[in-house]
Image: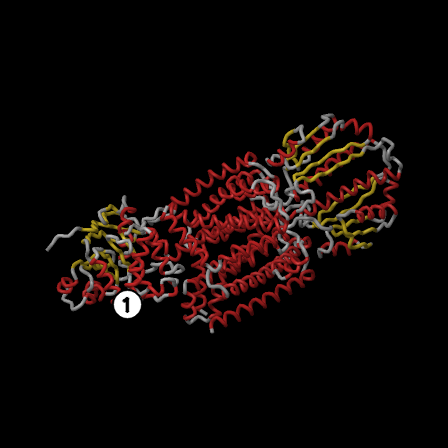
Amino acid sequence: MRILATLLVKEFKQIFRNRLMLPIIFVVPVVQMILLTYAASLEMKGINMAVVDQDYSQASRLLVSRFEASPFFEINLSTGSYQEAENELTSDHVDVILHMQHDFELKLYSEKETDLQLVVNAINATEAGLINAYCTQIIADFNGQVRARWFGLEGSGLLISLDIIPKYWYNPLLDFKIYMFSGILVIIVTLIGMLLTALNLVREKEMGTTEQINVTPIRKYQFIMAKLIPFMIIALFELAFGLVIGRLLFGLPIVGSLGLLFLFTCVYLLTVLGIGLFLSTISNTQQQLMYMAFFFMLTFILMSGVFTPAESMPQWAQKLNLLNPVAYFMKVIRMILLKGSEFRDISREFYSLCIYATLILTLAITNYRKTS
Amino acid sequence: MEVREHIIEVKDMVKKYGSFTANDHLSFHVERGEIFGFLGANGAGKTTAMRILCGLSYPTSGEIRVAGHDVYRERERIKRKIGYMSQKFSLYEDLTVSENIHLYAGIYGLGRKQIVVREEQLLERLGLAHVRNRLIREIPLGWKQKLAFSVAIFHQPAIVFLDEPTGGVDPITRRQFWEMIHDATEEGITVFVTTHYMDEAEYCDRVSIMVDGRIDALDTPAALKQQYESVNMNEVFLKLARS
Amino acid sequence: MKRFFGFVKKEFQHIFRDKRTLLILFGLPIVMIILFGFVVSTEIRDVKVGIWDRSMDQASIRATQKIFSSGYFVPAGYIDHEEEIGELFRSGKARVVVVFEEGFERNLLREDRAAINLIADASDANTAQLSLTYLQGVLMTYFQSMNQDVEVPWSVNMKSRMFYNEEMKGVYMFIPGLMALILVLISALMTSVTIAREKEFGTMELLLASPLKPREIILGKVTPYVLLSFVNAMTIVLLGFLVFDVPVRGSLWLLMLICMLYITLALSLGVLISTNVKTQQMAMFISLLGLMLPSILLSGFIFPIENMPKVLQWFSAIMPPRWFIVIVKNIMLKGTGFAFIWKETLILLGMTIFFILAAVKRFKIRLN
């Protein structure tokens, strides 16, 4: 115990003596949290629409007025030239073109149905899908209620109608920021914990100071623990710090138990710091480590469902996610903070990470070589 | 001549890196309390051999005992009884003089009070009391090396291994450094030192000279000079290297 | 000149000796393409839906079947108490619960209108909104089709055309951003760290004392990375084409030229960073935070710029990847020519010149 304490004193002194550390611990996360949370929004603002009404009839104008009335669409351009509208689409000024040909109304009366052309810029497929869905709704609505009113079918019992009432629990105002924020908090805690721990050990290796440690009777687990504990404390502090910022700046709800969250975070940190230490035992230079850590972090984070729910990923990715500690934490932090999930709701994730942490730490300790 | 205990005993030690043989069947012993010089050109295999004795590297084969313990099975026991100072690194640059002393003393399990008392004595003797709170990176190389040596023997080990301890320092500091080594032997510490400064070999009780992974000569400096009909160790070395 | 080539050769050997780093260098674009192509999509799929059917009649059962045959939703079981909704959400077993009111079919037939409640776990607001939008679409279409029996005079048929991306593949959106990301990573991060390493270990002094001119040293250091970056950029284009049929509709030459311009820009940024730092760690953190994050977040790679607050939109205007992504989208996906991208190209060119000048100036100050 005394040896571990001696080593811990050394680590803390070195960490706080490093001039890079304080900005990394305090400034960088704040900037990231604010910047990222505002930038990383998938929220759709107004969809820019160009209307090419070559008919300019009563029917076409009525349809356009339906789009005008929708909160989702903003009509930026009304023109008779399709080419002009397509140019605007190509230069990204509009997202969608609504095109009605000159026989729009004529066909409606003579053939009982008429075509409406919708041209969507689909480079962003999700946005395109959403635009298409909104348009479908408006057209269906137009087909149903508008014509019903015209022909006096309403209330005649001939047409049925459905009231669909959407309700949003936990977040009735659909504030996108709190979801992003909790995800970003995970990224920061992970990044700081894993990268700093791993870099620290490899730096000692590269500088040759581990040599001196290796000729002493220090046990491997003591040395690894001394590397792990300080950064674990820093990462836990980072979480607390982040929660305060989230609460003050973004009104982050903390529905569940903070004790449970911190307990889970401890197990999580043991796992990711263990991975960091393992990576550092297999690299010789900081450069090597950086690329490896960078590669794993990026893959872990992208697969964790930071932007999109992990359940929507293909099966093989979900299987791979069993090995991805970030995915567990990403899910659990949101469950506890936003929905107030309890221990029994997250017990599977908790025990999985316990096993994971034990395995990876054992691997890191056995793989650390005092003798080459 | 009095028979002294063999504190290091090496028989047929071999270390291979792939097809390259760094140590080719080395056999020698070191007696308790002596200064044993391990000489040779760069790349002759000195550091490799020393790293094996310290438990930093596995030998390929051979029988090796250090301070009464086997290097294959009892490395951690050995580590309690030795001190080590390397050419590359000795102290943490971003810790102060005092913090380095406390760190290493703490690692060997010395009590806090004991550390404080001995630290005081040590800094007094080295004349470094005024820089105790300065970072290592801020003090001159000569001071660093003296301090590194003192830290390496702070826990009073049976043997101290010194890997080219005087590299890059001026002749006066080197002289003072060797006086410190002598003082250590007075306290009963055995010194195992590698160097390529041949004049330093004169300070050793016995020296071995390595060439291409083998020990070509091993005796007291006086005997070697006589055997090779040389006025100093430098000449001995050159004659050995040319043959 | 011969001396210079000797130096470049040494730098190449240095990079190629470390097999693991090399593997990551060439593996990274492949893994990223696969991740963005298959995994990181902002579409929804297999959303778990719980059903609270309080009437259990023909209409509600058929509506339920419709929901699960749409392809977006998977069943998460039936419940019959209000409290169970919370339990489903808290344990993550369901994201949406559909509630059919009591006497659903009766209301539909007798009163011509009935109500369905859709309750979403909106802790993930985006998925919640998308799910409910899609659910509404499915239900609306189904009940509209019941109206088909009624003789109505006419209807408008909507025909959608998905421009540039007929099959609506998510990966189209990510390819240009991925190129920007990988190029910045290799060109700027790696060069700045490599040069910082030479400084940290004192070997830079050695090089500067050699007969090589400072300009040759820097050029020698960056040349291998120019090639590596270029190969990687082309790997992305090729993989995108082979695996996901992402086309290069415009001129491939123009695309390559723009890539070279962007690589030059990133390299000069890397050199600029390295002249300002003392340690590898510092170089890495500056590159990561100053370059990587903005190229992921403020460049329109994943998140559309027009959705950001105004301040961030201004910020994004000074981010090189933003302009690069616009250009690549135009050349690759829209097939437009230089006429549509000259403005963005000019901006990149200006930035490149600025960074080169700044790096050269810093380097000279260092030497004096």
Question: In the image as oriented, which residue stretches furthest toward the left?
Answer: B1
The residue nearer to you, when weighing C329 against C89, is C89
Q: Chain of mark 1?
A: B
Residue A82 is at least partly visible in this image: yes
Q: Residue A145: x, y in percent?
A: 83, 39
Q: Is residue A294 above or below residue C124?
A: below
- Relative to A40, does residue C147 appear above or below in the rendering? above
Looking at the rendered structure, the secondary structure element under dot 1 is helix
Q: Residue C180, image x and y in percent? A: 58, 56
Quarter holding residue A170? top right
Nearer-the-camera pick, C14 or A208: A208
Residue B217 at x, y = what percent? Answer: 18, 59
Query: Three-letter amino acid code at disc 1?
Result: Thr
Q: Which residue is mark 1?
A: B173
Of residue A87 and residue A76, the one placed in the foreground of this image is A76
Tell me, yes or no, if residue C34 can be seen here. no
In-image side of A107 versus B4 (left or right): right
Crowding near the residue tagged with mark 1, few <14, some 14–19, many ≥20 C-alpha atoms within 10 Å: some
The residue drawn where x is 59% and y is 35% is C91
Q: Position of residue A20 (x, y in %)?
A: 49, 59
Task: Decide if residue A218 is on the left or right side of residue A48.
Answer: left
Q: Residue furthest bottom?
A: C368
